[in-house]
Amino acid sequence: MFNIIKMATRNLRRYLRRTLLTSALITLGVVAVLLFVSVSGSFKAMMIGQITDSALGHLQIHKKGYLSSMDNLPLNMNLTHKQLNKVREILDNHEAVESYSMRIKFGAMFSNYNETTNIRLNAIDPDQELKTVPLLGDRFIEGEKEGLLGPGEILVPELIAKGMKVKIGDSIVLVATNKDGSVNGQPFTVRGILEGISGPGGRDGYVGLTDARSLLRMEEQEISEIAIRLTDLGLMGGVFTQLETALAGFKNKMDKPVFEIHTWEKISPFFNITRMIDLMTFFIKIMLVAIVLVSIMNVMIMAVYERINEIGTIAAIGTSPGKILALFLSEGLLLGLLGTAMGVAISLASIATMNITQISFDFGRQKGLLLSPTIGATDVITISLIVIGIAVLGSLQPAWKASRMDPNTALRHV
Protein backbone atom coordinates (compact mmCIF):
# COMPACT_ATOMS: atom_id res chain seq x y z
CA MET A 1 0.00 0.00 0.00
CA PHE A 2 2.91 2.31 0.77
CA ASN A 3 4.23 1.88 -2.78
CA ILE A 4 0.83 2.78 -4.22
CA ILE A 5 0.72 5.99 -2.13
CA LYS A 6 4.26 6.77 -3.23
CA MET A 7 3.35 6.30 -6.90
CA ALA A 8 0.19 8.41 -6.46
CA THR A 9 2.25 11.22 -4.93
CA ARG A 10 4.72 11.06 -7.83
CA ASN A 11 1.89 11.21 -10.37
CA LEU A 12 0.38 14.28 -8.70
CA ARG A 13 3.77 15.99 -8.74
CA ARG A 14 4.09 15.26 -12.48
CA TYR A 15 1.01 17.40 -13.07
CA LEU A 16 1.82 20.00 -10.44
CA ARG A 17 -0.17 22.90 -11.90
CA ARG A 18 -3.34 20.83 -12.18
CA THR A 19 -2.82 19.42 -8.71
CA LEU A 20 -2.41 22.88 -7.19
CA LEU A 21 -5.43 24.30 -9.01
CA THR A 22 -7.64 21.41 -7.91
CA SER A 23 -6.38 21.62 -4.34
CA ALA A 24 -6.98 25.38 -4.37
CA LEU A 25 -10.57 24.83 -5.46
CA ILE A 26 -11.13 22.33 -2.65
CA THR A 27 -9.41 24.71 -0.24
CA LEU A 28 -11.72 27.53 -1.28
CA GLY A 29 -14.77 25.36 -0.62
CA VAL A 30 -13.52 24.25 2.79
CA VAL A 31 -12.69 27.83 3.80
CA ALA A 32 -16.10 29.08 2.67
CA VAL A 33 -17.93 26.42 4.67
CA LEU A 34 -15.87 26.67 7.86
CA LEU A 35 -15.99 30.47 7.91
CA PHE A 36 -19.73 30.50 7.26
CA VAL A 37 -20.33 27.89 9.98
CA SER A 38 -18.21 29.81 12.48
CA VAL A 39 -19.63 33.27 11.72
CA SER A 40 -23.26 32.15 11.41
CA GLY A 41 -22.88 30.02 14.54
CA SER A 42 -21.50 33.02 16.42
CA PHE A 43 -24.35 35.24 15.23
CA LYS A 44 -26.90 32.56 16.09
CA ALA A 45 -25.46 32.08 19.59
CA MET A 46 -25.33 35.86 20.10
CA MET A 47 -28.93 36.25 18.98
CA ILE A 48 -30.16 33.42 21.20
CA GLY A 49 -28.17 34.81 24.12
CA GLN A 50 -29.64 38.28 23.70
CA ILE A 51 -33.18 36.90 23.56
CA THR A 52 -32.94 34.37 26.39
CA ASP A 53 -30.56 36.23 28.73
CA SER A 54 -32.23 39.63 28.36
CA ALA A 55 -35.90 38.75 28.69
CA LEU A 56 -37.26 35.25 28.08
CA GLY A 57 -35.10 32.72 29.87
CA HIS A 58 -34.59 29.25 28.40
CA LEU A 59 -37.94 27.75 29.43
CA GLN A 60 -41.22 29.16 30.69
CA ILE A 61 -44.04 27.56 32.69
CA HIS A 62 -47.61 28.89 32.61
CA LYS A 63 -51.07 27.77 33.46
CA LYS A 64 -52.55 25.65 30.68
CA GLY A 65 -53.91 27.90 27.92
CA TYR A 66 -52.11 31.04 29.06
CA LEU A 67 -49.72 31.28 26.11
CA SER A 68 -52.50 31.26 23.53
CA SER A 69 -54.09 34.28 25.23
CA MET A 70 -50.87 36.00 26.36
CA ASP A 71 -51.50 39.10 24.24
CA ASN A 72 -54.45 39.91 26.49
CA LEU A 73 -52.36 39.40 29.67
CA PRO A 74 -55.21 37.56 31.44
CA LEU A 75 -54.96 37.83 35.22
CA ASN A 76 -57.59 35.11 35.67
CA MET A 77 -55.12 32.54 34.30
CA ASN A 78 -52.42 33.09 36.89
CA LEU A 79 -50.90 30.22 38.84
CA THR A 80 -52.17 30.00 42.41
CA HIS A 81 -50.01 29.74 45.52
CA LYS A 82 -50.68 26.00 45.81
CA GLN A 83 -49.79 25.38 42.16
CA LEU A 84 -46.63 27.48 42.52
CA ASN A 85 -45.41 25.33 45.39
CA LYS A 86 -45.73 22.21 43.26
CA VAL A 87 -43.72 23.75 40.44
CA ARG A 88 -41.07 25.14 42.78
CA GLU A 89 -40.58 21.74 44.37
CA ILE A 90 -39.89 20.20 40.95
CA LEU A 91 -37.52 22.99 39.88
CA ASP A 92 -35.62 23.07 43.18
CA ASN A 93 -34.87 19.35 42.86
CA HIS A 94 -33.72 19.46 39.23
CA GLU A 95 -29.94 19.69 38.92
CA ALA A 96 -30.03 21.26 35.43
CA VAL A 97 -32.10 24.25 36.61
CA GLU A 98 -29.71 27.04 37.53
CA SER A 99 -32.35 29.58 38.57
CA TYR A 100 -35.94 30.63 37.94
CA SER A 101 -37.90 33.85 38.20
CA MET A 102 -41.58 34.26 39.00
CA ARG A 103 -43.38 37.05 37.15
CA ILE A 104 -46.76 38.71 37.02
CA LYS A 105 -47.51 40.09 33.58
CA PHE A 106 -50.19 42.73 33.28
CA GLY A 107 -51.21 45.82 31.38
CA ALA A 108 -51.69 49.28 32.87
CA MET A 109 -52.18 52.94 32.05
CA PHE A 110 -48.98 54.95 32.38
CA SER A 111 -49.42 58.64 33.27
CA ASN A 112 -46.89 61.42 33.74
CA TYR A 113 -49.74 63.62 35.10
CA ASN A 114 -50.03 65.37 31.72
CA GLU A 115 -50.38 62.49 29.27
CA THR A 116 -51.44 58.85 29.47
CA THR A 117 -50.49 55.77 27.44
CA ASN A 118 -50.65 51.99 27.67
CA ILE A 119 -47.76 49.94 29.04
CA ARG A 120 -47.04 46.24 29.47
CA LEU A 121 -45.40 45.34 32.75
CA ASN A 122 -43.44 42.50 34.29
CA ALA A 123 -43.63 42.31 38.05
CA ILE A 124 -40.47 40.59 39.28
CA ASP A 125 -38.27 39.76 42.21
CA PRO A 126 -35.05 41.64 41.27
CA ASP A 127 -32.64 39.02 42.63
CA GLN A 128 -34.42 36.12 40.94
CA GLU A 129 -34.74 38.02 37.66
CA LEU A 130 -31.05 38.95 37.45
CA LYS A 131 -30.04 35.33 38.04
CA THR A 132 -32.44 34.11 35.37
CA VAL A 133 -31.86 36.81 32.72
CA PRO A 134 -28.40 38.20 33.60
CA LEU A 135 -28.23 40.55 30.59
CA LEU A 136 -31.23 42.56 31.78
CA GLY A 137 -28.89 44.96 33.55
CA ASP A 138 -27.01 45.58 30.29
CA ARG A 139 -30.18 47.06 28.79
CA PHE A 140 -30.02 50.09 31.08
CA ILE A 141 -29.64 53.31 29.12
CA GLU A 142 -29.97 55.47 32.19
CA GLY A 143 -30.37 54.80 35.89
CA GLU A 144 -28.79 52.78 38.65
CA LYS A 145 -28.27 49.14 37.68
CA GLU A 146 -27.26 47.94 41.13
CA GLY A 147 -30.13 46.02 42.69
CA LEU A 148 -32.27 46.57 39.61
CA LEU A 149 -35.41 47.70 41.46
CA GLY A 150 -36.52 48.96 44.85
CA PRO A 151 -39.97 49.36 46.43
CA GLY A 152 -42.08 51.92 44.59
CA GLU A 153 -39.72 52.05 41.59
CA ILE A 154 -40.29 51.28 37.92
CA LEU A 155 -38.08 50.53 34.93
CA VAL A 156 -39.51 52.22 31.84
CA PRO A 157 -38.87 51.05 28.26
CA GLU A 158 -37.04 53.58 26.09
CA LEU A 159 -39.89 54.20 23.64
CA ILE A 160 -42.36 55.13 26.37
CA ALA A 161 -39.76 57.22 28.20
CA LYS A 162 -39.11 59.25 25.05
CA GLY A 163 -42.77 59.49 24.07
CA MET A 164 -43.91 60.56 27.53
CA LYS A 165 -40.76 62.63 28.21
CA VAL A 166 -40.02 61.06 31.57
CA LYS A 167 -36.57 61.00 33.14
CA ILE A 168 -34.81 59.30 36.00
CA GLY A 169 -36.36 60.31 39.31
CA ASP A 170 -39.66 61.45 37.81
CA SER A 171 -42.89 60.45 39.50
CA ILE A 172 -45.49 58.63 37.41
CA VAL A 173 -48.79 56.87 38.10
CA LEU A 174 -49.84 53.38 37.04
CA VAL A 175 -53.54 52.60 36.82
CA ALA A 176 -54.47 48.94 36.47
CA THR A 177 -57.59 46.80 36.48
CA ASN A 178 -57.51 43.63 38.53
CA LYS A 179 -59.20 40.36 37.58
CA ASP A 180 -62.38 41.35 39.45
CA GLY A 181 -62.74 44.50 37.32
CA SER A 182 -61.89 47.08 39.97
CA VAL A 183 -59.46 49.87 39.11
CA ASN A 184 -56.57 51.05 41.26
CA GLY A 185 -53.82 53.62 40.85
CA GLN A 186 -50.41 53.84 42.47
CA PRO A 187 -47.46 56.26 42.15
CA PHE A 188 -44.00 55.05 41.13
CA THR A 189 -40.57 56.64 40.76
CA VAL A 190 -38.64 56.07 37.52
CA ARG A 191 -35.54 54.07 38.52
CA GLY A 192 -34.17 53.34 35.06
CA ILE A 193 -34.78 53.50 31.32
CA LEU A 194 -34.34 50.26 29.39
CA GLU A 195 -33.17 49.78 25.84
CA GLY A 196 -35.72 47.77 23.89
CA ILE A 197 -34.89 44.45 22.27
CA SER A 198 -36.66 42.74 19.42
CA GLY A 199 -39.18 40.08 20.29
CA PRO A 200 -41.57 39.32 23.19
CA GLY A 201 -40.87 41.35 26.31
CA GLY A 202 -38.56 43.72 24.49
CA ARG A 203 -40.73 46.76 25.25
CA ASP A 204 -42.03 45.83 28.67
CA GLY A 205 -41.55 47.84 31.85
CA TYR A 206 -40.63 46.32 35.21
CA VAL A 207 -41.94 46.79 38.74
CA GLY A 208 -41.50 44.79 41.94
CA LEU A 209 -43.75 41.84 42.79
CA THR A 210 -44.90 43.40 46.05
CA ASP A 211 -45.85 46.66 44.33
CA ALA A 212 -47.72 44.78 41.61
CA ARG A 213 -49.73 42.78 44.14
CA SER A 214 -50.64 46.00 45.89
CA LEU A 215 -51.62 47.70 42.62
CA LEU A 216 -53.67 44.69 41.47
CA ARG A 217 -55.09 44.09 44.97
CA MET A 218 -54.03 40.47 45.05
CA GLU A 219 -54.84 38.91 48.39
CA GLU A 220 -52.86 35.73 47.73
CA GLN A 221 -49.63 35.03 45.87
CA GLU A 222 -50.28 34.63 42.14
CA ILE A 223 -47.85 34.31 39.24
CA SER A 224 -48.39 34.61 35.48
CA GLU A 225 -45.25 32.79 34.40
CA ILE A 226 -42.07 31.19 35.68
CA ALA A 227 -38.98 31.84 33.56
CA ILE A 228 -36.25 29.20 33.91
CA ARG A 229 -32.51 29.42 33.26
CA LEU A 230 -30.60 26.16 32.74
CA THR A 231 -26.99 25.41 33.57
CA ASP A 232 -26.40 24.67 29.88
CA LEU A 233 -28.60 25.69 26.95
CA GLY A 234 -27.61 22.47 25.21
CA LEU A 235 -29.60 20.53 27.82
CA MET A 236 -32.82 22.33 26.95
CA GLY A 237 -34.40 19.54 24.92
CA GLY A 238 -33.87 16.88 27.58
CA VAL A 239 -34.86 19.12 30.49
CA PHE A 240 -37.99 20.23 28.63
CA THR A 241 -39.08 16.61 28.22
CA GLN A 242 -38.37 15.81 31.86
CA LEU A 243 -40.25 18.83 33.20
CA GLU A 244 -43.12 18.29 30.80
CA THR A 245 -43.47 14.72 32.04
CA ALA A 246 -43.29 15.80 35.68
CA LEU A 247 -45.87 18.57 35.23
CA ALA A 248 -48.22 16.37 33.18
CA GLY A 249 -49.07 14.45 36.33
CA PHE A 250 -50.99 17.40 37.78
CA LYS A 251 -54.63 17.49 36.66
CA ASN A 252 -57.51 19.81 37.46
CA LYS A 253 -61.02 18.74 38.47
CA MET A 254 -61.88 18.15 34.82
CA ASP A 255 -58.89 15.78 34.50
CA LYS A 256 -57.04 18.19 32.23
CA PRO A 257 -53.40 19.34 32.62
CA VAL A 258 -52.87 22.29 34.95
CA PHE A 259 -49.53 23.47 33.54
CA GLU A 260 -47.91 24.07 30.19
CA ILE A 261 -44.20 24.46 29.52
CA HIS A 262 -42.55 26.01 26.49
CA THR A 263 -39.01 26.54 25.25
CA TRP A 264 -37.86 29.99 24.15
CA GLU A 265 -38.10 28.65 20.59
CA LYS A 266 -41.87 28.30 20.90
CA ILE A 267 -42.28 31.77 22.37
CA SER A 268 -39.91 33.84 20.23
CA PRO A 269 -40.43 34.48 16.49
CA PHE A 270 -36.66 34.66 16.11
CA PHE A 271 -36.47 30.89 16.26
CA ASN A 272 -37.43 30.96 12.58
CA ILE A 273 -34.29 33.00 11.89
CA THR A 274 -32.13 30.38 13.59
CA ARG A 275 -33.77 27.72 11.45
CA MET A 276 -32.98 29.75 8.35
CA ILE A 277 -29.34 29.97 9.46
CA ASP A 278 -29.22 26.18 9.86
CA LEU A 279 -30.83 25.74 6.45
CA MET A 280 -28.33 28.08 4.82
CA THR A 281 -25.48 26.16 6.46
CA PHE A 282 -26.88 22.92 5.05
CA PHE A 283 -27.02 24.32 1.52
CA ILE A 284 -23.48 25.71 1.83
CA LYS A 285 -22.31 22.20 2.72
CA ILE A 286 -24.11 20.81 -0.32
CA MET A 287 -22.31 23.38 -2.48
CA LEU A 288 -19.00 22.25 -0.98
CA VAL A 289 -19.79 18.63 -1.84
CA ALA A 290 -20.65 19.65 -5.42
CA ILE A 291 -17.42 21.67 -5.79
CA VAL A 292 -15.23 18.84 -4.54
CA LEU A 293 -17.06 16.16 -6.51
CA VAL A 294 -16.93 18.03 -9.83
CA SER A 295 -13.33 19.15 -9.45
CA ILE A 296 -12.01 15.73 -8.43
CA MET A 297 -13.97 13.89 -11.12
CA ASN A 298 -12.74 16.33 -13.76
CA VAL A 299 -9.12 15.94 -12.73
CA MET A 300 -9.27 12.15 -12.48
CA ILE A 301 -11.10 11.73 -15.80
CA MET A 302 -8.41 13.84 -17.49
CA ALA A 303 -5.71 11.86 -15.70
CA VAL A 304 -7.13 8.57 -16.97
CA TYR A 305 -7.53 9.91 -20.51
CA GLU A 306 -3.99 11.29 -20.70
CA ARG A 307 -2.42 8.16 -19.21
CA ILE A 308 -4.15 5.46 -21.22
CA ASN A 309 -0.84 4.19 -22.65
CA GLU A 310 0.68 4.21 -19.17
CA ILE A 311 -2.29 2.26 -17.80
CA GLY A 312 -1.97 -0.24 -20.62
CA THR A 313 1.75 -0.67 -19.90
CA ILE A 314 1.41 -1.35 -16.19
CA ALA A 315 -1.52 -3.68 -16.90
CA ALA A 316 0.55 -5.56 -19.51
CA ILE A 317 3.40 -6.20 -17.08
CA GLY A 318 1.00 -7.85 -14.65
CA THR A 319 -0.38 -5.08 -12.42
CA SER A 320 -3.72 -6.26 -11.15
CA PRO A 321 -6.91 -4.23 -11.77
CA GLY A 322 -7.24 -3.85 -8.00
CA LYS A 323 -3.89 -2.09 -7.72
CA ILE A 324 -4.70 0.21 -10.65
CA LEU A 325 -7.99 1.06 -8.96
CA ALA A 326 -6.17 1.73 -5.66
CA LEU A 327 -3.62 3.94 -7.46
CA PHE A 328 -6.21 6.34 -8.85
CA LEU A 329 -8.26 6.30 -5.65
CA SER A 330 -5.10 7.20 -3.75
CA GLU A 331 -4.54 10.18 -6.04
CA GLY A 332 -8.06 11.41 -5.31
CA LEU A 333 -7.51 10.81 -1.58
CA LEU A 334 -4.27 12.82 -1.60
CA LEU A 335 -5.93 15.68 -3.47
CA GLY A 336 -8.70 15.72 -0.87
CA LEU A 337 -6.22 15.61 2.01
CA LEU A 338 -4.10 18.42 0.57
CA GLY A 339 -7.07 20.70 -0.15
CA THR A 340 -8.66 19.99 3.22
CA ALA A 341 -5.45 20.59 5.17
CA MET A 342 -4.89 23.95 3.50
CA GLY A 343 -8.55 24.90 3.91
CA VAL A 344 -8.59 24.08 7.63
CA ALA A 345 -5.34 25.98 8.23
CA ILE A 346 -6.56 29.10 6.40
CA SER A 347 -9.97 28.95 8.10
CA LEU A 348 -8.52 28.69 11.62
CA ALA A 349 -6.13 31.56 10.89
CA SER A 350 -9.00 33.68 9.53
CA ILE A 351 -11.20 32.94 12.57
CA ALA A 352 -8.37 33.91 14.91
CA THR A 353 -7.85 37.15 12.96
CA MET A 354 -11.54 38.05 13.15
CA ASN A 355 -11.50 37.53 16.91
CA ILE A 356 -8.45 39.76 17.27
CA THR A 357 -9.94 42.56 15.15
CA GLN A 358 -13.24 42.38 17.14
CA ILE A 359 -15.81 42.91 14.40
CA SER A 360 -19.04 44.48 15.70
CA PHE A 361 -22.58 44.43 14.31
CA ASP A 362 -26.09 45.57 15.21
CA PHE A 363 -28.98 43.22 15.99
CA GLY A 364 -32.37 44.87 16.22
CA ARG A 365 -31.99 47.70 18.71
CA GLN A 366 -28.81 46.22 20.14
CA LYS A 367 -25.79 48.19 18.91
CA GLY A 368 -22.12 47.32 18.81
CA LEU A 369 -22.41 43.61 19.52
CA LEU A 370 -19.03 41.91 19.10
CA LEU A 371 -18.80 39.02 16.67
CA SER A 372 -16.80 36.17 18.17
CA PRO A 373 -16.65 33.41 15.56
CA THR A 374 -15.66 30.00 16.85
CA ILE A 375 -15.55 26.59 15.27
CA GLY A 376 -15.84 23.35 17.20
CA ALA A 377 -13.53 20.41 16.66
CA THR A 378 -16.57 18.32 15.73
CA ASP A 379 -17.47 20.66 12.85
CA VAL A 380 -13.89 20.74 11.57
CA ILE A 381 -13.56 16.95 11.69
CA THR A 382 -16.99 16.36 10.15
CA ILE A 383 -16.44 18.74 7.25
CA SER A 384 -12.92 17.39 6.67
CA LEU A 385 -14.17 13.80 6.55
CA ILE A 386 -16.98 14.80 4.17
CA VAL A 387 -14.52 16.49 1.79
CA ILE A 388 -12.05 13.61 1.87
CA GLY A 389 -14.83 11.06 1.43
CA ILE A 390 -16.28 12.94 -1.54
CA ALA A 391 -12.79 13.25 -3.05
CA VAL A 392 -12.40 9.47 -2.95
CA LEU A 393 -15.95 8.97 -4.21
CA GLY A 394 -15.32 11.37 -7.10
CA SER A 395 -12.27 9.32 -8.08
CA LEU A 396 -14.15 6.04 -8.06
CA GLN A 397 -15.67 6.10 -11.56
CA PRO A 398 -12.48 7.18 -13.37
CA ALA A 399 -10.45 4.71 -11.27
CA TRP A 400 -12.87 1.89 -12.09
CA LYS A 401 -12.65 2.75 -15.78
CA ALA A 402 -8.85 2.71 -15.65
CA SER A 403 -8.74 -0.65 -13.84
CA ARG A 404 -11.01 -2.28 -16.45
CA MET A 405 -9.08 -1.18 -19.54
CA ASP A 406 -7.92 -3.87 -21.94
CA PRO A 407 -4.09 -3.67 -22.13
CA ASN A 408 -3.98 -4.29 -25.92
CA THR A 409 -6.53 -1.55 -26.63
CA ALA A 410 -4.79 0.87 -24.22
CA LEU A 411 -1.33 0.29 -25.78
CA ARG A 412 -2.69 1.04 -29.25
CA HIS A 413 -4.21 4.35 -28.06
CA VAL A 414 -2.65 7.43 -29.65
Image (spheres, helix red, strand yellow):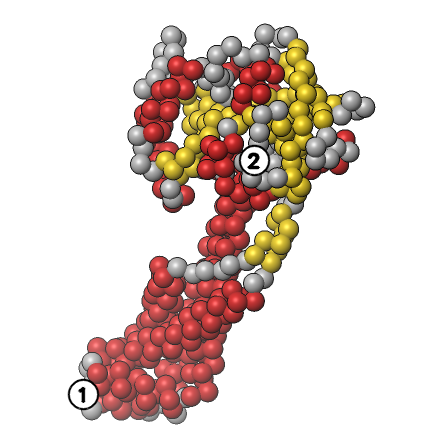
Disc 1: which residue: 318
Q: Residue at position x 46%, y 23% from top?
A: 62
- Residue extending farthest to the right is 114
Q: Residue at position x 36%, y 61% from top?
A: 377
Inspect the image, locate mark 1, and give the three-letter code of the amino acid beneath it.
Answer: Gly
Q: Looking at the image, is 342 positioned above or below residue 265?
A: below
Lateral position of residue 206 relative to residue 132, left or right: right
> Label 2's element?
loop
Q: Quadrant of residue 206?
A: top right
Mark 2 vs mark 1, CA separation in Å: 84 Å
Q: Residue at position x 70%, y 35% from top?
A: 168
Q: Nearer the viewer, residue 289 or 225?
A: 225
Lateral position of residue 284 relative to residue 1, left or right: right
Residue 253 drawn at (x, y percent): 38, 8
Residue 40 drawn at (x, y percent): 51, 56
Residue 68 shows in the view: no
Residue 234 drawn at (x, y percent): 38, 45
State which quarter of the image contains the C terminus.
bottom left
Disc number lying in front (2 or 1) = 2
Residue 53 drawn at (x, y percent): 50, 41
Mark linked to residue 148:
2
